[in-house]
């Protein structure tokens, strides 16, 4: 998504509410709608293409009890909401989709979420 610049996730938006990400977040961004694989055959390899969601995962957030409850309500509803994220490089993306809560680590107050857009992420300001 960026031109050879790396960095953490700066912020995350769910249903119009902005949340701060931990400074060490190394989120996994799936930027393609297709996963390509080559299957061996007795002759040339056969291309296998599998459709996939352009999700963003591995996002631990530091949340208050109220914020955690807000995200839980959105995730439990399973309805489309506005999603967005900004990288420290300044790149921002938005989409509409759902949120999944992966887990909550009480010792460090980390709640991990996954953003699952219905379509593609749109780069803002591009």
Image: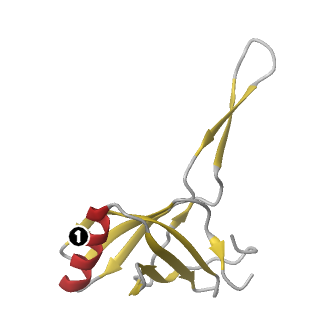
- In the image, is 4 to the left or to the right of 110? right
- Dot 1 surroundings within 10 Å: few (below 14), some, or many (20 or more)? few
Q: Examine the image and state in which quarter residue 36 appears.
A: top right
| Residue wearing tag 1 | 105
**Residue 103 x %, y %:** 27, 63
**Residue 81 x %, y %:** 43, 71
**Residue 99 x %, y %:** 38, 65
Looking at the rendering, in which quadrant would you find the C terminus?
Answer: bottom right
Residue 109 showing in the rendered view: no
Q: 90 or 74, which lies in front?
A: 74
| Residue farthest to the right, as pictured | 44
Looking at the rendering, in which quadrant would you find the N terminus?
Answer: bottom right
Q: Residue at x 18, y 83 (%)?
A: 65
- In the image, is 83 to the left or to the right of 19? right
Q: 8 or 20, which lies in front?
A: 20
Residue 21 showing in the rendered view: yes
Q: Disc 1 on helix, strand or loop?
A: strand
Q: Residue at x 41, y 64 (%)?
A: 98
């Amino acid at each position: 998504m960026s031109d050879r610049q790396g960095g953490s996730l700066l912020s995350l938006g769910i249903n119009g509410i902005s949340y701060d990400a931990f400074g060490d977040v190394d989120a996994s961004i799936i930027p393609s709608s297709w996963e390509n694989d080559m299957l061996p055959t007795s002759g040339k390899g056969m291309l296998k293409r599998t459709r996939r969601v352009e999700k963003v995962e591995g996002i631990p957030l530091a949340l208050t009890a109220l914020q955690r409850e807000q995200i839980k309500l959105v995730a439990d509803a399973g309805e489309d909401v506005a999603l967005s994220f900004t990288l420290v490089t300044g790149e921002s993306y938005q989409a509409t989709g759902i949120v999944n809560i992966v887990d909550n680590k009480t010792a460090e107050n980390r709640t991990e979420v996954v953003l699952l857009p219905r379509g593609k992420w749109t780069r803002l300001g591009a």
